[in-house]
Amino acid sequence: MTPRRNLVLAVAIAALTCVGVGIHWTVTSWPTLPPPPLPTRPPVLPPGASAQELLAAAMQVQSDNESMLFALPGVVGVGIGFTDAGTPTIKVFVDASAPPVSGGLQGIPEALGLFPVTVEPAGPFRVLPPEPAAPVSADEGPVPTGRFDRPVPMGVSTGHTRSTAGTIGAVVTDGERRYALSNWHVFVPGGEGQVGDVLLQPGPVDGGADPGDAIGTLTAFEPVVLSPFATNRIDAAIARTDEVLPETPVGGYGSPRGTTMAAKPGLQVQKYGRTTRLTVGEVEAVNASINVTYGSAGSQVGRFVGQIMVCCNFSKGGDSGSLIVARDLDRDGNAGPDDRKPVALLFAGDGRLTIANPIDLVLDRFDVTIVGEDAGR
């Protein structure tokens, strides 16, 4: 190789080295951006796939992409809803209380696999402290925060001696004994309750005190793991009692059915609770993964999976523990075959949306069934 060629080669190598250094500096100096959507394999669906097959396929795509979505700024929940056309959409719930992210909702794709993505402001979701009960006129029935003669109806105030108040959701049975069903955070305040503890009707914030207002004893509960990486499925507890009737007070929906049903987007539902009494809503999302805040300071977060979301303004603080049942009425008010079938157990919300555990998960955990108008599940 001639001296001239050696010189040319040296200059070229030096230039490439400089360019390489420049490129490296430029790349590592870029601001960190949200990760791009993970590649997903679109589900293979047969022509004319059923609504159930489409829903199952959407849930699989949701599962494949959930970690990516929760890593994005402001995302507090992901679930499956329906579009206006009645087809599945992956709903991404972003924190409505957080300041806007510079550049908008960076990183949230418009679609995942075969399914569109719907972004909705919501949250933060939390276990809400009890609020004053809504005013009740004489023809609307009794105030659910009051003390009831024994046996008491379901849907009224209850609580641990060291808690505030929630709602008696339902009467359940293991075939031999009966129990009152409510939430873990209602019957086991702060996670510090123990089996055998006394439970009250009404709850302490509504004037209940031991021993005069004792209604039962704590029998079993499912602790909530307070971690954003947890996979909680229920917030529930049961109390041994023979002092609760399987029906709501006057002004409620009456007795639930003993046969449960699964939620689906668009299902009409109702509940009777301590604070807002009888309300009607619609299932907005199923299979939802949600970050839920516990504690007055709002510093403890538990991740829940497989949850049901109900819209709109369906509940307030103090309604925790309410049983959510289907509302199946025709135009003349005649009940259909699904009316009053238990669907979910209410436990949290954000004021507009309500979060609830699928009722079958709750019943399976305690090996019980709903005491209702028909037997079994």
Image: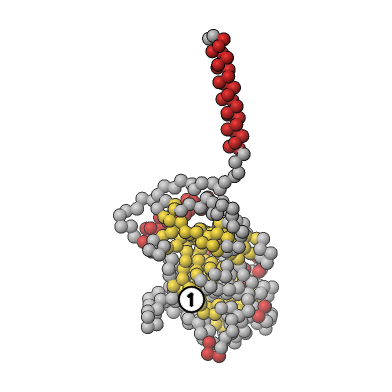
Q: Position of residue 171 (x, y in %)?
A: 52, 76
| Viewer-nearest residue: 108 or 193 | 108
Examine the rendering and report whether any part of residue 309 can be seen.
Answer: yes
Examine the rendering and report whether any part of residue 232 can be seen.
Answer: no
Tally the numbered discs.
1
Q: Residue at x 38, y 76 (%)?
A: 337
The residue indicated by pointer 1 is 280
The extreme top residue here reads 2
When the figure is inspected, residue 135 is found, relative to residue 38, above or below; the finding is below
Q: Residue at x 51, y 79 (%)?
A: 278
Q: Position of residue 66 (x, y in %)?
A: 51, 53
The extreme left residue here reads 47
Q: Position of residue 241 (x, y in %)?
A: 58, 78
The way the protein has been coloured in the rendering is secondary structure
Q: Residues within 10 Å of mark 1 (few under 14, many from 20)?
A: some
The extreme bottom residue here reads 138
Q: Residue at x 67, y 81 (%)?
A: 207
Q: Which image quadrant is residue 208 in?
A: bottom right
When the figure is inspected, residue 21 is found, relative to residue 227, above or below; the finding is above
Q: Given the image, on which type of amino acid does mark 1 rest?
A: Val
Task: For the C terminus, give its image quadrant.
Answer: bottom left
Q: Position of residue 154 (x, y in %)?
A: 54, 79
Disc 1 is placed on an element classified as: strand
| Viewer-nearest residue: 75 or 15 | 15
Q: Residue at x 54, y 62 (%)?
A: 121
